[in-house]
Image: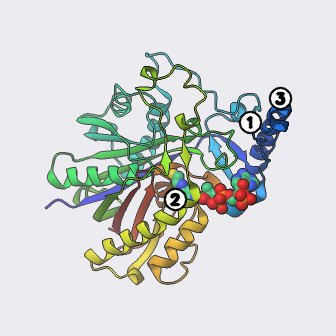
Amino acid sequence: MITPAITGTGVFTPEQVITNDELVAAFNAYAERFNAENAEAIAAGEVEAKAPSSSEFIVNASGIEQRYVMDKTGVLDPEIMHPILRERSNDEPGIMAEIALEACDKALAQAGRDPSEVDLIICAASNHERPYPAVAIEIQKLLGAGGFAFDMNVACSSATFGIQAAADMIRSGSARCAIVVSPEICSGHLEWRDRDCHFIFGDVCTAVLLEPADAAKGAHFIVRSTRCATQFSNNIRNNNGYLRRTRESNMEDRRDMLFVQEGRKVFKEVLPLVSAHISAHLEVESVGSEALKRLWLHQANKAMNDFIGRKVMGRTPTPEEQPNILQDYANTSSAGSIIAFSKFSSDLTAGDLGLICSFGAGYSVGSVLVEKG
Ligand code: COA
C-alpha cells in the first residue's frame, strides 16, 4: 500500500494590505454618501439608512486586523467598493493561474521537485474565474506539468477535500506527484457595501504537494488519514452562476449574486458539526486528543476557532498548539488552514501528530490527520 505524504507547501501573499481602519473609513464614507443621496426616501421610511462600521467591532467579532487583497484602490473607493482586476485576453495567463504559479513554485522548491514531475493538479477553490477550460489545466500548461488536472469547489473546504482526492489517487497509484492549489480571490465575491460582512475576506493562494512518502526527498508529513463530510445548508450561499442570463435582466444589483451568510446561525450550527467531526476522526484513528501536537484550523472567526480548540483538546490550546493567521489574512476560504499549516509546522519532529481542519459553506467539513515523517 502506498502511503501519501505532504512534501511541500507554498503561500502566495498579495502585496496590498487593507487595515481595518482603512476599510472602515471607506465603508463609512460610502454609507454617508448613500444616506445623503437617499435622504428623502430614508425620511419617508422607504429606504433603510446605512449604519456605520467600526474597527473595534471587527476585531471583537472576528479577530481580523487586516487583509491582503489583489486590488485595494477599487475596494477603498466609496464610489466603487469592489476590486478592479484587469481583464486578461485569452492569450494571457488568467489571474488565478498567475498567483497559483507562485504558490506552486514554492511548494515544488520545498519538495525538491521539478514541475515536469507533477502528474496531477487540482485547482480547489471557492470560486473559479470561468467555467472552462479548467483553471487547473491552464496551471498545468504554464507550469509545464504532465498528467491531468481539474477544478473542484467545496467552498471553504475545497483544499482539504482536494487533499483527500489527491491522497486517495496517490494511494491507488493513479497519481505520483500531485498539487492541490487554492487561489482564493475572495475580494471578488465579497459585497464590500454590506456592513455585516465587509470585513470578512482576504486574498491569497496556497499550494500543497503530495507524493508517496517513500519518495520524499526531505522533511514531510505523512497523511495518516482524511475525513470529509457535508450537510446541506443555505446559511452561506452565493446564487451567481451561468443560468443568471436566462432569468431576469436586472441581476446586477441583486445582493444574492455575491457571498451572503447568516453569520450567527453559521457560528452556532457549524461549531458542533466540526467538533463532532474531529472527535470521530480521531476516534477512528485511535488517536487521543492529548497526542495532537497541533491543530491547523480553518480561519474564519477567532472565537469559533478558540471554541473548537477547547472542545477538541479538552482544555484551552496554547497559541503554539493552535496557530491563528486570521488577524493578518482575514478569512481566505479554503486556503486559511493551509496557510497556518505552511507557516507553523516546520518545528514539529518525527512522529508528531497534527490535524488540518476546514469548514464552511455546504456545510462542509474536511480534516487531514498528518504525522511528521
Ligand atoms: N460594525 C459595527 N457593528 C456591526 C457591524 C460592523 N461592521 N456589523 C454588525 N454590527 C452590529 C450588528 O448591527 C448587530 O447589532 P445589534 O445587536 O444592535 O443588532 C451586532 O453588531 C451583532 O451583529 P452580528 O452580525 O450578529 O455579529 P456577530 O457577533 O454574530 O459577528 C460574524 C458576525 C460574521 C463575525 C460572526 O457571526 C461569524 O464569524 N460567524 C461565522 C462566520 C463563518 O464562519 N462564516 C464562514 C464563511 S466561509
Q: Quadrant location of ligand 1?
A: bottom right
Q: Residue at x 75, y 41 (%)?
A: 48
204 is higher (above) or lower (below) than 288: above
Residue 50: image x %, image y %? 77, 42
Q: Which residue is mark 3?
A: 37
Q: Residue at x 76, y 31 (%)?
A: 77
Marker disc for residue 76: 1
**Nearer-N-terminus badge (2/1):** 1
Q: For the residues carrying marks 3 and 1, which lies nearer the camera in this image?
A: 3
Residue type at tag 2? Val
Q: For the residues carrying marks 3 and 2, which lies nearer the camera in this image?
A: 3
Residue 370: image x %, image y %? 34, 66
Marker disc for residue 181: none
The answer to whether residue 177 is left or right of residue 295 is: left
The answer to whether residue 119 is left or right of residue 205 is: left
Mark 3 neighbour density, 10 Å: few (under 14) some (14–19) many (20 or more): few
Q: Residue at x 41, y 55 (%)?
A: 363
Residue type at tag 3? Glu
Marker disc for residue 266: 2
